[in-house]
Amino acid sequence: MCRNIEIMNKIRDADPADSVNMEKLKMQAHQLEIEMTIVYKEFGDKYGEKAKDPKFIKKFNRELRKTMLDCPSLSQKDRALFEKELDE
């Protein structure tokens, strides 16, 4: 997720006239999409029905938010939101 935020920020900030850089960033985003699809499938294979349990989802989301706080590309707004959710 952090890498996705980083790439999306780079795409947003890139000069649209720099077609070489834009193409490079779009390819990185596409590669990351493939990797995320694989991870999602592996997660589903590993946790299956357990991943549908509200307690599991709550614990997973909490751990995900804690991890995302280490993401240097996370916006201040999202960082504050994650910190608030962790305090609840």
Image (cartoon, rainbow, N blue to C red):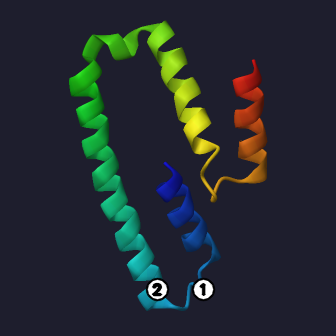
Mark 2 neighbour class, 10 Å CA radius: few under 14, some 14 to 19, many 20 or more: some
Label located before the other in sequence (1 or 2): 1
Q: In this view, does 47 lie to the left or right of 84?
A: left
Q: Are marks 1 and 2 in contact (CB under 8 Å)?
A: yes
Residue assigned mark 1: 15
Q: Is mark 2 on a helix, strand or loop?
A: helix
Whole-percent x, y for residue 62 in the image: 58, 25
> How many marks overall?
2
Q: What element carries label 1?
A: loop
- Estimate the spatial distance between the alpha carbons at disc 1 and disc 2, rounded to whole Å: 8 Å
Mark 1 neighbour class, 10 Å CA radius: few under 14, some 14 to 19, many 20 or more: few
Q: Is residue 41 left or right of residue 84?
A: left
Which image quadrant is residue 47 in?
top left
Residue assigned mark 2: 21
Can you say which quadrant of the picture contains the C terminus?
top right
Query: What residue lies at 64% left-to-right and 75% top-to-bottom?
Result: 13
Whole-percent x, y for residue 46 in the image: 24, 24
Residue 15 vs residue 82, the one in the foreground:
82
Up the image or down, 11 lies above or below 57; here it is below
Which image quadrant is residue 37 in?
top left
Query: What residue lies at 72% left-to-right and 26% top-to-bottom?
Result: 85
Whole-percent x, y for residue 17 in the image: 55, 91
Residue 69 vs residue 7, the one in the foreground:
69
Which image quadrant is residue 45 in?
top left
Query: What residue lies at 29% left-to-right and 11% top-to-bottom?
Result: 49
Amino acid of disc 2: Asn
Query: What residue lies at 33% left-to-right and 11% top-to-bottom?
Result: 50
Q: Is residue 44 left or right of residue 53?
A: left
